[in-house]
Amino acid sequence: MPGWPSYDEVLGLPCGDRVVVPPESGDDNGHLNVRHYLGLFDDAEWVVYERLDLGADLARRGIGGIFALEQHLTYRREVAVGDEVSVGIRLVGRSARMIHLVSHLLNHTRREVAARMEALEGYVDLGTRRLAPIPEPQSTALDRLLAEAAALPWQPELSGTMAPR
């Protein structure tokens, strides 16, 4: 049944780097300001994309890159300044040109899943600046991650408003 996974379930996903929330990312309430959640999700995606050779190297060479198309953030638990966090990423679908994923913000200090972001992203040919098919062998690597995610015993909660076309 779809829902929020447990802390331990998210630990099994491909994750971005662990970071400690710095004071400059806080607000007057002493917790992570909402503007910085997206940055944490984005940074983690790039770590995973780099592992798949879909990251900055392709963009620097002018070949292609992943562009954000749509995002839906949901907050569940507070994250305080000084908490250690990371983001686990689960692919839920893809087409030849698009990737659908759900990322979960883990608060390691409190052993909680604090937030979730569902996203739709597209591969863009940087010569044409248009959506293009994800190249090989990157599409094969994405399919491997999709198969691993599909074999997990839990299903992520989805907004129902986005899917690859």
Image (tube, rainbow, N blue to C red):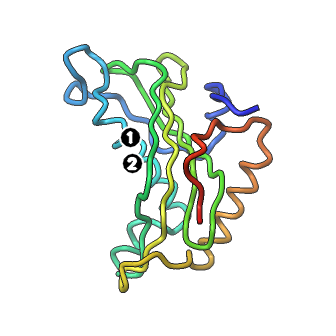
Task: Name the residue located 51 percent from the left edge and 69 percent from the top edge.
Answer: 53
Q: Residue 8 occupies which quadrant of the picture? A: top right
Q: Residue furthest front?
A: 161
Q: The C terminus is located in which quarter?
A: bottom right
Q: Which mark is residue 40?
A: 1
Task: Name the residue located 24 percent from the left edge and 30 percent from the top edge.
Answer: 25
User: Mark 1 and 2 residues: CB-CB less than 8 Å, in contact?
Assistant: yes
Q: Residue 31 occupies which quadrant of the picture? A: top left
Task: Name the residue located 75 percent from the left edge and 35 percent from the top edge.
Answer: 154
Tell me how far mark 1 sits from mark 2, CA to CA: 5 Å
Q: Secondary structure at mark 1?
A: helix
Q: Vertical placement of 51 versus 113: above or below?
A: below
Mark 1 Cα-neighbour bin, 10 Å: few <14, some 14–19, many ≥20: some
Q: Residue furthest bottom?
A: 127
Q: Vertical placement of 8 versus 155: above or below?
A: above
Mark 2 Cα-neighbour bin, 10 Å: few <14, some 14–19, many ≥20: some
Q: Secondary structure at mark 2?
A: helix
Image x and y of residue 60, in percent: 33, 75
Image x and y of residue 23, in percent: 22, 24
Q: Which mark is residue 120?
A: none
Image x and y of residue 48, in percent: 52, 54
Instruction: Identify which residue, 13 or 158, lies in the foreground.
Output: 158
Q: Residue 111 occupies which quadrant of the picture? A: top right
Q: The N terminus is located in which quarter?
A: top right
The type of residue carrying mark 2 is: Asp
Instruction: Identify which residue, 56 or 114, lies in the foreground.
Output: 114
The type of residue carrying mark 1 is: Leu
- Tell me if 63 is positioned left or right of 87 in this view: left
- Tell me if 146 is positioned left or right of 131 in this view: right
Q: Which mark is residue 43?
A: 2
Q: How many marks?
A: 2
Q: Vertical placement of 86 versus 61: above or below?
A: above
